[in-house]
Amino acid sequence: MKSKKKRRQDDFQKVKLKVGKRKPQADNATDTNFRSKGINLPEQLKTDTSGPTTHRQLGINDLLSQLHHYNANVKHSALLGLKELLSSSPSVLDQHLSRLLSEVAAVFTDKDGNVRVAATRVLRFIAQSVPAERVAPFFPLLRAHLSCAMTHIESSIQEDAMKVLDVLLEHYPAQLAARPAVLLTNFLELISHRQNSGGAKRTQDSKGRTWALSVNPNRNLTSQQWRLSVLLRLGRFLQAVVEERPVEEVDISVQNEGVFGSKADGTLTPLYLTWEELRCNKGGIKVYEHSGATPTQHSSFKLRPEVDSGGTDLEGLSSGEAVQNFAATLVPLLLEVWVESSTTDTTWSSCEGAHLLSPDAMSVMFQVLSVLQLLRKLAPQREHQDSLDAWFRKEFLGDFQQHFMKNFPYGIQDAPRHKMRVNLKRNKQVATVSGATVDPLALNITLCQVMVSLCQKNALGPEVDGDWLAPLRTFVRETLSNEVKLSYRQLYMLLGTVWKMMLTQRNKTVTEELLAAVYFYYQQKHLTLQTRSLLLSFYSKIYEQEHGHTHIARSKVLSRWLASLPVQLVQLGHRNPALSARLIQSIQAAASRGNPDLLSSLQTQACKLYDPEEGIVVLLPSESQQRMVQLLFFLPKMPKPLLANLSFCCTAGRISASHAASLIRIVHLRSSLSGWLAGSQEAALQDVDYISFLFSTLTGFSSDKLASLQEAATVRALSTSLLSPVGLLPTQLEQFSHHWDVVEEICHCLETLGSKSQCFDIMQSGILEYLSKLRVVPDSMAAGLLRAISRLLDVSTLPSEQVLRFLSQCCLSLLTQLVTQQQEASANTSHKREAIWGACVAALSSVPRLLRMVLQLRVGALNEEERPQLGQILSMLLQHTPLHNQLMANTNLLVEMIQHLSRCSRGATREQWLTDLLYCYSVNIAHGSNAQRGNLGVRELY
């Protein structure tokens, strides 16, 4: 026993410490006498340089991986980092578009509201940067996540899903509307629920409706505000579906809606087809068997055989039956929303008889009507539209009359505002829903349009649908007649309502009342260009329907409107060229039909319209000028003042040469001398006035202008000489070219009159009376006279001596001008020089006596500067082959002139112009058989 105890004491023996002695080191003591070195791993410490990063040094992979984190703050910061990264580095969006869309769409249903809001902002940024064609491959995934969010059990997620839907509707409406079936069902489930549950069907109502409105008290919004939010998005979605319908919907031959209902505005847009695109396209292209004025609407020809696709047509709203089934579910719900909104607040009646509503109720009711309008437009093809309208009338006309027309018209209730403490968060949410405040006028106009669309087509009297249409007509008439300020959209809808009423009611009294109301609005001042153009388009297309509808024919209001158009055109002038063009277009359409009221007013205002200084014919653009020129054909009469204005318009250069030529042709056709009159159309002008018009236009200048040129200052500036007996006023190249084209057209008209000799006698009389005594004339007028004389002169015609003298002076002056300006001539003036030379040569060759007068010039009286010019003129004439016969016939005069020039130019050296003249004479004339005697005198000069 002692030995064991002793051993235990040895094991746990206490160490005795002594003063001054070092403390013994423990057995487990750590030896710190060592040196350490750092371990450097450069590969691990490197930052990720594979792509751009945020300010927190996070790349795209890090941010996308954080979206799967369980913490909402991490996901929110990751979404903020994504937006920062995409803003600073757009290339990341192109490289990682697929991952971005899938990861961002996955958090549409996140439990945290801040994460959903951040995801919506990132989606908006992506949508603003990526086009639709690049998103198309990934859009089914976006649509699936959106559908999950819209049908989520959490109401807050459903509310945020509306914001996601807004982004997609704004940027990708076509992709969203491509497969509308699932989303339409989701819209129904947002505001309603099925009445059957648990497999056992509940009792349905009398009409077999299985959907009823739902109420969720857990929402941050009231039921009315939530339904308004859903209906707003449903309307935008249906609008996208309607806009993405195939082009074959637009059919210009449809007469039920009338041409005013189309947005084609009377113009046809060509449709370019590509077989590769049509091969996989479900939309059809209508091919008419008999095209032309009345194409066959229902053609048996099919571009491809129709294949029964089972239930996909119903799901995709690509058949009339599918649209009816969807409308049968939605319209009863819309009626319940209407009844709920109209009876939620205490009803008020104003002193004007309007049923007052709160702003929220009015917004909801307006969206109900807007959705109903879009439902009618969902017909996949035009042939389904009539059946869909008939179905709407059969199923819901009674309900619409009961609920919509009961308190029509509606007004807004001005509720007093009380100061109270409000919840800022709730107030912010309400503001986002009620942002689109609806005007009561917009609600009433939309209601009119919805109800009028249900009118029975081809009604024969006002008694058909008259009981419920009367309040609508009264509202439309009072709105247009009481100077109510309407927006363009509201006016467009009202005019569409008026159009529909007139074409369905077919009653003259109703038509006159409605047209009078529209005309009262048309007469208001300060209407915008867009509004005025819309009204003009409405009346023009109403007038086009006049011959097919007896209740529109001979309308007094329409006649008064037509008679006012020329007056409005004069008053408007060129201040608004676009509106003036619309007025001219309307005037032309009525004038082509021979409307007496318009033609009488147009005749009265013709001189003002065609005034050469301030008339719109010279102030408007070229296209409008062309229409104004065409209007001349329909004028009953063309008096002398109007012809004077037209002549000045042609010569002043304010309209183009082509328009001036068209004007001259129209005046020619309206004269009895042309021998062509359309139908029972009488000649618009007398023969004397027509000839005076042609002669005045041929001269190119008015009598006052020619008289002013004869003043002393002008005569001194354009000094005359023996070689240039008439002073020529040089005209600008543009003015000369314009006048030359006019001269050619006048010569063509004169040649078609029949007797050239009579035309020449008339022209000769005009020259003798008005032009032969002029000392200064423009070169364009002189060339034009020579051109006309050469084309009109007949072999049996003998010009008078005085006329020949004036023409020879003009010809000699023009030839002198060509020679003097030959050295200064440029390439731009070649056309003018050729025209003048051609006119002179044509006159000299066609009028032999004219050439003889030119050759009878007194050469001895010429000075030293004029002799070389005459020599060059003679050289030019000798080189022209068509003049050889006339020159050989006047060889004696020609030889005498050459001899005089040679004697006056004798010297040590012969000048070059004389050498050229002698050479031209020897080559072209001296070798002729009829000029042997003339050669003897000239040979001596060699």
Image (cartoon, helix red, strand yellow):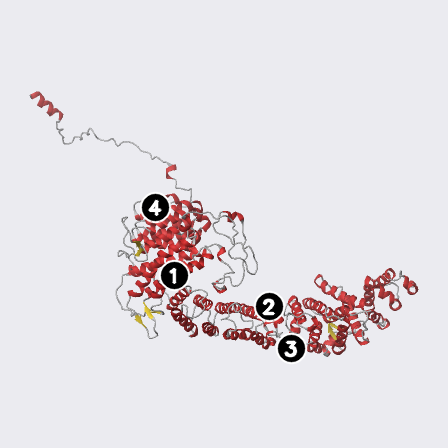
- Can residue 705 be seen at all in this image of the molecule? yes
Which amino acid lies under the numbered mark 4 shown in the image of this protein?
A: Leu
Q: Residues within 10 Å of mark 4 (few under 14, many from 20)?
A: many
Which quadrant holds residue 686?
A: bottom right
Disc number placed over residue 639 in the picture, else none: 3
* Disc on the earlier residue, 4 or 3: 4
Label 3 to label 1: alpha-carbon separation: 62 Å
The answer to whether 34 is drawn above or below residue 76 in the figure is above
Circle 2 or circle 1, nearest the eye = 1
- Can residue 942 be seen at all in this image of the molecule? no
Secondary element under disc 4, as helix, strand or loop, is loop
Q: Which residue was labeled with disc 2?
A: 627
Secondary element under disc 1, as helix, strand or loop, is helix
Q: Which residue was labeled with disc 1?
A: 394
The image position of residue 573, as x and y in percent, is: 56, 73
The image position of residue 851, as x and y in percent, is: 83, 69
The image position of residue 779, as x and y in percent, is: 73, 70
* Disc on the earlier residue, 1 or 4: 4
Q: Which residue was labeled with disc 4?
A: 67
Circle 4 or circle 3, nearest the eye = 3
* Disc on the earlier residue, 2 or 4: 4
Looking at the picture, tell me which residue is in the foreground, 292 or 855: 292
